[in-house]
Image (tube, helix red, strand yellow):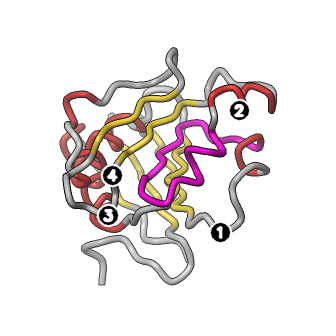
């Protein structure tokens, strides 16, 4: 079931949505982020990182390196946040080259994937809990964020 749409007006508000998401995800979850360029995907991941105990100041768009991993809060069930950008990936072999299936299979990590597309959808491990996040930049500079949680889960802060 889709959650209500959230509208943010500043990058700080978008990060706050990411923090709420970070309070909701669990080890082994995948967060699939879709939206046009500059829609706020990486900004949202900064908030996700902060909630998981990773350094949000270290979070940059992994467009050219494809995968960045950040250590999370010691003692947390989530040991790492993997931040993946598939914008430049066009062939299944390229997913193999970056070890995406292995990252998604880690039961002590959260994997946030920008530009997931059809290639990834066909490669997700079947038992992976998937959060689907869609960001849309609006003409007034605000962002519309829709979050669909895995079955049986909800976004923190919503009743």
* C-alpha gap between disc 2 and disc 4: 23 Å
| 52 displayed left or right of 102 | left
Which residue is the site of mark 1?
A: 127
CB within 8 Å, label 3 to label 1: no
Which residue is the site of mark 4?
A: 79
112 is within the stretch colored magenta: yes
Sooner in the amino-acid sequence: mark 1 or mark 2: 2
Circle 1 SS class:
loop
Give residue 95's mark: 2
Sooner in the amino-acid sequence: mark 4 or mark 1: 4
Sooner in the amino-acid sequence: mark 3 or mark 1: 3
Relative to 150, say whether 143 is above or below.
above
Q: Position of residue 77 (x, y in %)?
A: 32, 64
Sooner in the amino-acid sequence: mark 2 or mark 4: 4
* C-alpha gap between disc 4 and disc 1: 19 Å
Q: Nearer the viewer, mark 2 or mark 4?
A: 4
Where on the picture, by quarter, is residue 129?
A: bottom right
Mark 4 surroundings: few (<14), some (14-19) or many (≥20) residues within 10 A: many
Q: Is residue 123 visible?
A: yes
* C-alpha gap between disc 2 and disc 3: 26 Å
Mark 1 surroundings: few (<14), some (14-19) or many (≥20) residues within 10 A: few
CB within 8 Å, label 4 to label 1: no
* C-alpha gap between disc 1 and disc 2: 19 Å
Give residue 77's mark: 3
Mark 2 surroundings: few (<14), some (14-19) or many (≥20) residues within 10 A: some
CB within 8 Å, label 3 to label 4: yes
Relative to 103, say whether 155 is above or below.
below
Q: Position of residue 154 (x, y in %)?
A: 41, 76
Q: Quadrant of the N terminus?
A: bottom right
């Amino acid at each position: 079931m889709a959650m209500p749409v959230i509208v943010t007006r500043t990058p700080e508000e978008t990060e706050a949505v990411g923090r709420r998401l970070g309070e909701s995800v669990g080890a082994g979850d995948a967060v699939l982020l879709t939206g046009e360029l500059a829609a706020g995907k990486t900004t949202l991941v900064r908030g996700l990182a902060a909630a998981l105990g990773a350094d949000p100041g270290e979070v940059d768009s992994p467009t050219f390196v494809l995968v960045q991993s950040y250590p999370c809060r010691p003692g947390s069930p989530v040991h790492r946040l993997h931040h993946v950008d598939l914008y430049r990936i066009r062939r299944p072999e390229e997913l193999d080259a970056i070890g995406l299936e292995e990252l998604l299979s880690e039961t002590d990590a959260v994997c946030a994937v920008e530009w997931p597309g059809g290639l990834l959808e066909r490669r997700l491990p079947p038992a992976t809990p998937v959060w689907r996040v869609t960001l849309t930049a609006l003409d007034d500079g605000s962002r519309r964020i829709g979050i669909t949680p895995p079955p049986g889960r909800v976004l923190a802060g919503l009743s």
